[in-house]
Image (cartoon, coloured by chain):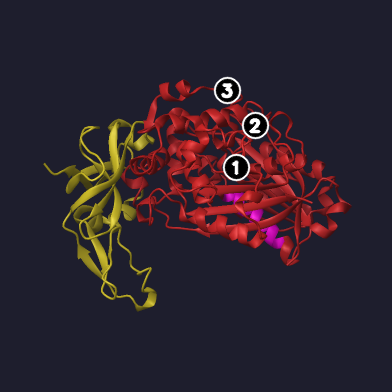
Amino acid sequence: MSVARFWRKIPQRYNLIGTRCETCGTYFFPPRSFCPACRREGKIVEHRFQGRGKVVTYTVIRSASEQFERLTPYILAIVQLDEGPRFTAQVVAEPGEIQIGTQVRSVFRRIGADGESGVIHYGTKFVPVR
Amino acid sequence: MRDVAVIGIGCTPFGEHWGSSFRDLFIQAGALALEDAGLSGEQIDALYVGNMSAGRFIDQEHIGALIADYSGLATRHIPATRVEAACASGGLSFRQAVIAVASGMEDVVVAAGVEKMTDVGTGASVDMLAGAADREWEGFVGATFPGLYAMIATDYMHRYPLTREQLAMVAVKNHFNGARNPIAQFRQEITVETVLRSPLVADPLRLFDCSPITDGAAAVVVAPLERAREFTDRFVRVRASAQASDTISLHDRADISRLDASVAAGRWALSDAGLTHRDIDLVEVHDCFTIAEICAIEDLGFCRKGEAGRLTEEGVTALDGDLPVNTSGGLKACGHPVGATGIKQICEVVQQLRGEAGKRQVPDAEIGMTHNVGGTGATVAVHILEVV
């Protein structure tokens, strides 16, 4: 991912800043700048999520793309935030430590890097709430 | 709208073709389709080609013109258009050709699909395929395609009675069929143990739950039904062509275990054709992973949610069952050159309807369906073909 493409989404990736439609009250993370329900009637504002949620589904990735090969095995999950939206993220835990419904909270972590000498990509992962 | 017929089919063997280039593959498939239709290149009015990612697999864009050129059609300047919808590129290419003929804009149209995947290593190709999902919010955090379908499987197995063994039986059945298909990448039968002993790729999916990385090309020729007999007496009719969309990301779906684009396209195709599920003699579904075949059978409406595992175990979807699924071997055993798969599915159903499927022939097959998925279900194309 190019530097500009990563840089543009730094607030969203680092601090879980998504959006909310004031017309219908729906929260969006990943952020949307256009409400799919209200369309042109929608009014989109920024919203910072609390970072609490639960695991909707998950897997343990054992075979990854080149960029993530060093991390295997790692847990990939769809997390539903308490505010409603679902998104895909890694969960920092041992395989077997989480299941569907496990409560998680967000943490700031290194996600990957643009090759050996490129920028390091940081973002949000989750850990189980104990 | 005019009725449309498929008047010729051609497909390269699927596999790792180290000695063949992208252009070698599509020329081979195109020549086979034209020969099958009894056509010369002079009669072709337009060309569509489904291709997911030549830009990344072989650093080549502008595929439509390239194919027209190397097929000897550039000097006639016919329109040549690339169609892309990830793994559903082939299905959409066929649909574009059908629309072109049905509308009256064109008469004789080639719909092709091609992918050359093995010129890059496995790690690179895993990354390229992840581009079929949301790069910024799925691929960026380490989602792979097996990983996304594995999350479907985790959700599904939590909610419905599907055993790990039943999932393996999908692969066993498709390898059985692939062993009877001369163009299949894997032509050997396997057992449930083969699947369960293979390495985990993304829990609960193992290597033998996954379709392979494949080189291959397929092409078909379509023409107005009323003119089909000018070319061949082995034509089949296109009864319905449907296409549906859904969210690009798995995490935004209304139901993780249900592909609503499959539900919509399946329903539209059957209603456009005026048919019911009982009329369908066989179906080629998009089994990029074993769990995908389970979902497809249910989402297309052949049974209720949660029943496809049991039906697979009972042999209902086997070659000699009530509803043979993936007689070609499916993506699992026949192989999955992503852009070509949707066209190969059409080729398989046409072969079955013409009674030319050899050892995997479904007796008296009259109506067949194809189901081609892009990504984790963001695009679905469903077609219904019928003996005339």
- Give the magenta-colored segment's residue range: B89-100
Give amino acid for label 3: Glu
Mark 1, Cα crowd under 10 Å, few <14 / some 14-19 / many 20+, is many
**What amino acid does circle 2 point to?**
Ser
Give the colour chain A carries in the figure: yellow
Q: Earlier in the sequence, mark 1 or mark 2?
A: 2
Q: Chain of mark 2?
A: B
Whole-angstrom CA distance, mark 3 to mark 2, is 27 Å
Mark 2, Cα crowd under 10 Å, few <14 / some 14-19 / many 20+, is few
Q: Quadrant of the N terminus of chain B?
A: bottom right
Q: Which residue is mark 2?
A: B20
Indicate whether residue B98 is drawn in magenta.
yes
Label 3 belongs to which residue? B189
Q: Is residue A85 magenta?
A: no
| Overall secondary structure of the magenta section | helix
Residue position marked by numbered label 1 in the rendering? B341
Seen from this angle, which residue lies furthest bottom? A41
Does dot 2 land on a helix, a strand or a loop?
Answer: loop
